[in-house]
Image (cartoon, rainbow, N blue to C red):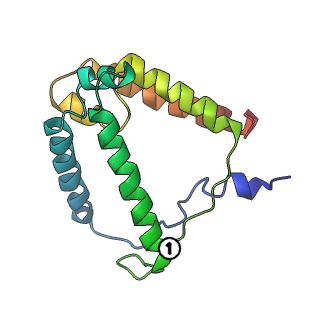
């Protein structure tokens, strides 16, 4: 039987969270990178409702190519981190927690996929969509936040 810590090892603090204190402007670099990333999303048409609908209707390879290249990049990155025992820029060891499969991942993936297909938006590009003037997406953003809150509220009563 799984221990509670095996399931919820990252409850309130991320495994690799830094405890360093920085000035407020230290985080501006994340804002800048986020804005640039949003611009790339817009230019690559990743936030396009039409591109997302094409993907779910199996009419275009565009989004599958983007997602597939992201998965491959992530796999290579994790392999390099593990192979060379890389550390953060502050010299802290990077810890990648082992993952175990459970049926909740299937249910969560289906709910996520249905929501993505219905709204034409996954959580990543929501802000970029809003930034382009698609203000109706604010409803999707609020729904995503509420869904996360509801899960957090009922988490201890759900099978994991």
Residue 18 point in image, percent of width and height: 44, 70
Residue 127 point in image, percent of width and height: 26, 35
Residue 91 point in image, percent of width and height: 41, 83
Which residue, as the protein is rendered here, is positioned at the far right? Answer: 1
Residue 72 lies, with reference to residue 84, above or below; the image says above
Q: Quadrant of residue 97?
A: bottom right
Q: Is residue 93 visible?
A: no
Q: Is residue 88 left or right of residue 148?
A: left
Q: Residue at x 40, y 73 (%)?
A: 20
Q: Is residue 145 left or right of residue 32?
A: right
Q: Secondary structure at mark 1?
A: helix
Q: Residue at x 44, y 59 (%)?
A: 75
The quadrant of the image that shows the C terminus is: top right
Q: Residue at x 49, y 29 (%)?
A: 112
Q: Name the foreground residue: 137 vs 120.
A: 120
Q: Name the foreground residue: 105 vs 152.
A: 105
Residue under pointer 1: 82
């Amino acid at each position: 039987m799984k221990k509670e810590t095996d399931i919820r090892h990252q409850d309130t603090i991320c495994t690799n969270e830094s405890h360093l204190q920085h000035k407020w402007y230290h985080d501006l670099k994340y804002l800048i990178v986020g804005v640039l990333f949003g611009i790339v999303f817009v230019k690559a048409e990743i936030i396009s409702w039409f591109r997302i609908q094409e993907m779910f209707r199996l009419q275009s390879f565009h989004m599958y190519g983007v997602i597939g290249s992201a998965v491959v990049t992530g796999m290579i990155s994790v392999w390099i981190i593990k192979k060379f025992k890389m550390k953060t820029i502050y010299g802290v060891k990077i810890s990648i927690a082992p993952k175990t499969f459970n049926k909740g991942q299937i249910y969560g993936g289906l709910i996520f996929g249905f929501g993505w297909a219905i709204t034409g938006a996954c959580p990543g590009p929501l802000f970029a969509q809003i930034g382009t003037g698609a203000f109706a997406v604010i409803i999707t953003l609020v729904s995503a936040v509420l869904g996360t809150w509801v899960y957090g509220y009922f988490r201890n009563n759900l099978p994991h």
